[in-house]
Amino acid sequence: MSSRPEKAPVTPQRLMEEEYFEDETFTDLDLQGARLGGKEFYRCTFERSHLQESRWPESKFEACVFRGCDLTRAQLAHTALRDVRFEGSKLMGIDWSAISPNPELAFDECNLRYSSFVGLSLRQTVFARCAAREVNFIDTDLSDTDFTGTDLSGSNFRGCTLTRADLRGAMGVFIDPAAHNRLKATRVPVETAVLLAQSLGMLVAGYGDEAAAQGERKKRR
């Protein structure tokens, strides 16, 4: 009975030179600034690898995991991402807007600060327990997304579809009523509802200015 030939060890040189990888694990690689375009990865895992400012034009990832990696400011122009999961990874400053249409992504305990998601369909994407401060979500379909445990302080939602999005467990959420977002069955924390009401000039019982205003009226009587 013939056995499958053993694969060569995964080295930075092999990753740079070959174009197709299946069922491979890439561990502790240092490829900062590397150009890794035109490659295909199927059921591959990247662990504890330094990939800051790496470039992946026209590459394809399917059923892949990035675990404990640093992809700060990585460039993903026309990169296809299908069933790709990022766990405990640093993804700061990435502009995801140029990735191939209809990505399938999940983020768990990742740092997404300063990232941009513009003009994408991210339906059913999970952003769990992430640091997503000052992120831009512009003209993006966020229907049925889940932001449980994610810090969205300073993030901008503009022209987004947030139908059935679950933001109840998120922190620092503010949905600007003048930013043309589409809301339907959108679940938000109480603090977000209060901020929205206050931005429209309302005073909410038990919160901030409303309590102060009541106290002032009592003094005047």
Image (tube, rainbow, N blue to C red):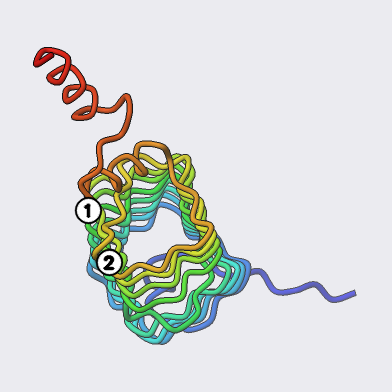
Compared with 42, 210 (above or below) is: above
User: Picture coordinates of residue 86 (x, y %)?
Assistant: 47, 56
Front residue of this view, candidates 193 and 57? 193
At label 1, the amino acid type is Glu
Q: Is mark 1 on a helix, strand or loop?
A: loop
Give the labeled residue for mark 2.
116
Give the labeled residue for mark 1.
134
User: Picture coordinates of residue 87 (x, y %)?
Assistant: 47, 50
Q: Count of labels shown?
A: 2
Front residue of this view, candidates 131 and 176? 176
Neighbor class of circle 2 (other Cα within 10 Å; few <14, some 14-19, many 20+) is many
At label 2, the amino acid type is Ser
Q: What element carries label 2?
A: strand
Front residue of this view, candidates 158 and 94? 158
User: Picture coordinates of residue 194 (x, y %)?
Assistant: 32, 39
Whether residue 77 is visible: yes
Name the residue rendered at 54%, 59% in the picture. 164
Front residue of this view, candidates 156 and 76? 156
Choose top left, top right, bottom left or bottom right for residue 116. Answer: bottom left
Compared with 168, 46 (above or below) is: below
Choose top left, top right, bottom left or bottom right for residue 5. Answer: bottom right
Quadrant (top left/top right/bottom left/bottom right) for the N terminus: bottom right
Q: Which of marks 1 and 2 is nearer the N terminus?
A: 2
Q: Rounded to the nearest whole Å, what is the CA distance between mark 1 and mark 2?
A: 9 Å
Residue 176 circle label = none
Name the residue rendered at 44%, 72% in the picture. 141
